[in-house]
């Protein structure tokens, strides 16, 4: 997998447009999901800024883990964005909203999965920021703890601990979900007033 | 007992590491079963394959790639010369004012210093200035795509392009100390401006205002034309922030 990515990167650096396209398709979903946890509904804008910079700075990429390079750009763009917005990261999602989301077509379509992608991401985004970032970089972007640590400017051990705590918290959240009535009931009972930190594109459309 | 607990904790940590490692790998195929359980499902769902709407920006990204590879990618830069010009003018005026006042102040110092011609390199700011001026408009948006990142972008035409202006009190004006203090004319300060911007933007909101009153950020204030413009000024620099062209791509 990393070898394949490296080939794509060097082809793209040599000007191969298809290789760049392939890179985009490989990395964009993870970047967008990570960015959604950081900046909420503005993730798409930040992601396109990120790709502009990736396209522009590709010649200066000097090797190493391309994923980490791209995700570092994305993170910087997100932090700039947040500063620009003068607001705090949209990292908290009221838990009731998740039951609503869990009922989406996403779930229905992928039988056998208890959670849809949006709901899973929303659950992760409800963690404390450090833990959410650690979990997303490890599980969704696919970085190892060392690389994720480099992106976050922290030690690998700290990333492992944060991810571990995050997963523990997620397990508890999942337990609670299991104890509550089925998603359909929850949807009619506790309709949240508005879907705060969630992206508007969170409708259950599937590709 | 405690040892057992520690062991349990460790093994759970190791489980978690496995789960985290496994989640992205299960993306393409479901042939291999992988770890099971609600947590594994959740991570797998979070790392599920791309949905079409997630790739909506593909053409925009590829267009950016194409544009960055064009030999002269300077076309869209033409959009912002006016701003460039005003920024340049502000710096220019600030430079003149600062030089004038510093000149007066230094005239006194110059007396007991005796030597007016201690500063040959600073006396001729004319030579470098026009060149940076040329580069600036093109460098703004698109020259950096071709590979020269911060340096070109930071070059605000800092010095008055005509040599005739500076010395009101001809003898002592362009001494090294003055330009070091005044900032805007000095090329090494200019290259550092993106760094200053980054440092400024990295500060928490509450500390920014205070930071601008410190000498370290003085140059930024001058270059931006006032403390209240610094943020905007820094946002415009490619080295410190993204270009505003980004958003419509979406």
Image (spheres, coloured by chain):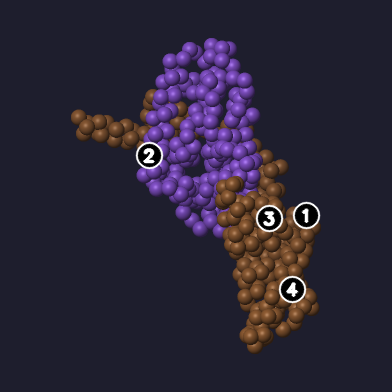
Chain colours: A purple, B brown
Residue that numbered label 1 is attached to:
B79
N-terminal-most mark, 1 or 4? 1
Q: Which residue is mark 3?
A: B227
Query: Gap between marks 2 and 4, in whole Å?
Result: 59 Å
Residue A103 location in percent, x, y?
A: 54, 18
Task: Choose between A18 and B236: the one closer to the eye.
Answer: B236
Q: Check disc 1: other Cα within 10 Å, few if <14, some if 14-19, many if 20+.
A: few
Q: Are marks 1 and 4 on the same chain?
A: yes
Is mark 1 in CB contact (under 8 Å) with mark 2?
no
What mark, if any, has residue A161 been given in the picture?
2
Per the model, the C-alpha gap separating discs 1 and 2 is 48 Å
Task: Say which quarter of the image contains residue A172.
Answer: top left
Mark 4 lies on residue: B100
Mark 1 to mark 3 CA distance (whole Å): 26 Å
Q: Residue A56: x, y in percent?
A: 62, 54
Asked if the residue at tag 3 contacts the one at tag 2, i.e. Cβ–Cβ closer than 8 Å, the answer is no
Q: Nearer the viewer, residue A167 or B232?
A: B232
């Amino acid at each position: 997998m990393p070898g394949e990515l490296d080939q794509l990167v060097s082809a793209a650096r040599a000007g191969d447009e298809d290789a760049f396209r392939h890179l985009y398709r490989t990395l964009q979903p993870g970047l967008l999901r990570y960015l959604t946890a950081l900046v909420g509904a503005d993730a798409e804008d930040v992601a396109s800024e990120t790709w502009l910079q990736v396209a522009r700075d590709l010649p200066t990429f000097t090797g190493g883990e391309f994923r980490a390079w791209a995700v570092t750009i994305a993170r910087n763009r997100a932090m700039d964005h947040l500063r620009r917005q003068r607001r705090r990261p949209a990292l908290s999602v009221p838990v009731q909203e998740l039951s609503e989301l869990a009922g989406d077509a996403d779930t229905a379509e992928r039988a056998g999965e208890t959670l849809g992608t949006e709901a899973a991401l929303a659950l992760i985004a409800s963690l404390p920021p450090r833990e959410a970032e650690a979990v997303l970089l490890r599980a969704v972007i696919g970085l190892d703890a060392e690389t994720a640590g480099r992106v976050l400017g922290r030690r690998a051990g700290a990333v492992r601990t944060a991810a571990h705590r995050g997963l523990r918290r997620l397990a508890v959240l999942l337990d609670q979900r299991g104890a509550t009535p089925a998603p359909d009931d929850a949807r009619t009972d506790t309709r949240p007033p508005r879907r705060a930190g969630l992206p508007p594109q969170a409708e259950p459309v599937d590709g | 007992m405690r040892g057992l607990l520690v062991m349990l904790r460790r093994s759970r940590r190791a489980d978690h590491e496995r789960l985290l490692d496994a989640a992205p790998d299960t993306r393409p195929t479901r042939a291999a079963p992988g770890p099971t359980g609600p947590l594994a499902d959740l991570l797998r769902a979070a790392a599920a394959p791309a949905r079409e709407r997630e790739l909506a920006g593909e053409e925009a990204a590829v267009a950016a790639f194409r544009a960055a590879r064009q030999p002269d990618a300077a076309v869209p830069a033409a959009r912002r010369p006016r701003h460039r010009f005003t920024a340049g003018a502000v710096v220019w005026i600030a430079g003149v004012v600062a030089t004038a006042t510093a000149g007066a102040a230094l005239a006194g110092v110059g007396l007991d210093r005796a030597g007016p011609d201690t500063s040959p390199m600073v006396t001729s700011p004319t030579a470098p200035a026009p060149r940076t001026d040329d580069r600036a408009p093109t460098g703004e948006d698109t020259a950096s795509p071709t590979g020269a990142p911060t340096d070109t972008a930071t070059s605000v035409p800092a010095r008055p392009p005509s040599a005739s202006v500076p010395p009101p009190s001809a003898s002592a004006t362009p001494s090294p100390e003055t330009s070091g203090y005044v900032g805007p004319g000095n090329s090494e300060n200019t290259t550092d401006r993106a760094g200053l911007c980054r440092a400024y933007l990295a500060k928490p909101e509450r500390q920014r205002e205070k930071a601008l009153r410190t000498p370290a950020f003085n140059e930024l204030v001058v270059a931006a034309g006032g403390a209240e413009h610094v943020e905007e000024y820094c946002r415009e620099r490619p080295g410190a922030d993204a270009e505003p062209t980004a958003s419509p791509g979406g």
